Amino acid sequence: MLYKILIMSLVSTTLFLSGCGSDSEGESRLETQVMLDNRDYDGVISKLANSNVKTDEDNLALGAAYMGRAGLSLSDLVKVVSESADETDAFGAFISSIDNATKDSKSPLPDLTKATQYYKDVVGDVCLDETDSLTDAQKDLCIFKGLSQIMGTATTIGYIADNVGSVFNSDGTIDSKLQASTCAMEYAISGRSEGCSSITEFDELTFASGLRYRDIEVNVDGEVFEYLLSGISTVITKGYCSTEDFATRVEDTNSTEYEDSFHVCPLNEDGNSTDLTTGSILADALNNGIDAIGVAADDDMRDDIDEFKIEVLESSGKSADEVITEDDIVNYLNQQNQ
């Protein structure tokens, strides 16, 4: 069972963080572990993130801290995986649980993106190795790297749909927001979409940080949703803000703070980081993150994962061993909305 392996991984990671070294190094690692145990994630990040020289232990601690700040500590993950394993659709239940756990976080997706990178700094690309040559320690790290990516997937789905279950079509409902998001993704790729009532493109928006986006509104049977486009992708947004002032972000347009000058607000606010786009997050997790978890998943969850990947690929007429693209994700979501 994945949750049993997670428990062992959690123990081994804790031992790694408090392992051997000089007295001062041991005290520093113990201090870091205590902060993680006390959920002082900002403290760990403040202590380690700006260091010019990072050890593997530092990167592991930072990965755990960013995952924790996104909404799930390593021990929380053990509980989520354990509870999800008893559901009929273990993978779908896992995604829904993670989405719920990260809703109260201020910046879950940027934090999870950083967590993934810190784990990758330790383990490199070995998680893509399809042989049985991985050591137990490498498998542990692949699990955490994969989990941070899957957490990012769950959070992304939470941004593009009102009901995460609608992506897996587990309850048979049609989600208007998901339908609009799919239309926006398709429009970004091809310049057209037939799945929604209408799409209107406005003048390009320029935010104070220097970020520039195409601005569209998608109409789904009278419901209107706004999206920002960057290249051939939709940008992940949260709430609404003025193009001049991110500090006035509000959660919805019914807020008394809302003004006509407000638009959907990109998660990447400072202009110094790569845009977080829907298709790239989902495609990366489906191609890499799921496989990383697969090295330790139990048979039921592995079957659910494989079935989900196959369904995404088959929506575009592809075989199971091909790479998933943003087009494939759009095709799959379109099928789920029918």
Image (tube, grey):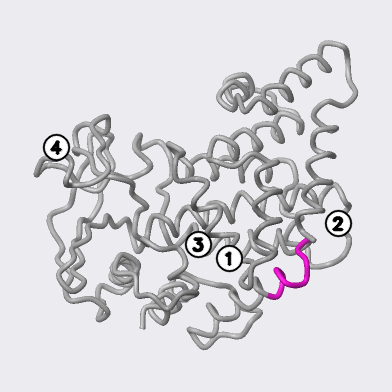
Residue, disc 4: 256
Contact, mark 3 vs mark 2 (Cβ under 8 Å): no
Question: Which tag, 4 or 1, sits closer to the chain's start?
Answer: 4
Provide residue 222's location: percent of width, then percent of height: 14, 70
In the rendered image, residue 16, in percent from the top left (x then y), is placed at 83, 33
> Which of the numbered marks, if any, corresponds to residue 134?
2
Tell me the CA gap for discs 2 and 1: 21 Å
How far apart are the two marked residues, 1 and 3, measured between alpha carbons? 6 Å
The secondary structure that most of the magenta stretch takes on is helix
Q: Which residue was labeled with disc 3?
A: 282
Query: Mark 4 vs mark 2: which is more N-terminal?
Result: 2
First in residue order: circle 3 vs circle 2: 2
Which residue does the image show at 88% across and 52% down from the upper left?
Answer: 135
Q: Residues within 10 Å of mark 1 (few under 14, many from 20)?
A: many
Element type where label 4 sits in the image: loop
The Cα–Cα distance between marks 4 and 2, rounded to whole angstroms, is 55 Å
The quadrant of the image that shows the N terminus is bottom right
| Closer-to-camera residue (224/256) | 256
- Residue numbers of the magenta segment: 296-303
In the image, what residue occupies the spot 77% across and 50% down? Answer: 6
Q: Are marks 1 and 3 in contact (CB under 8 Å)?
A: yes
Which badge, 3 or 4, is on the more N-terminal residue?
A: 4
| Tag shown at residue 286 | 1
Secondary-structure class at tag 1? helix
Secondary structure of residue under mark 2:
loop
Q: Amino acid at mark 2?
A: Leu
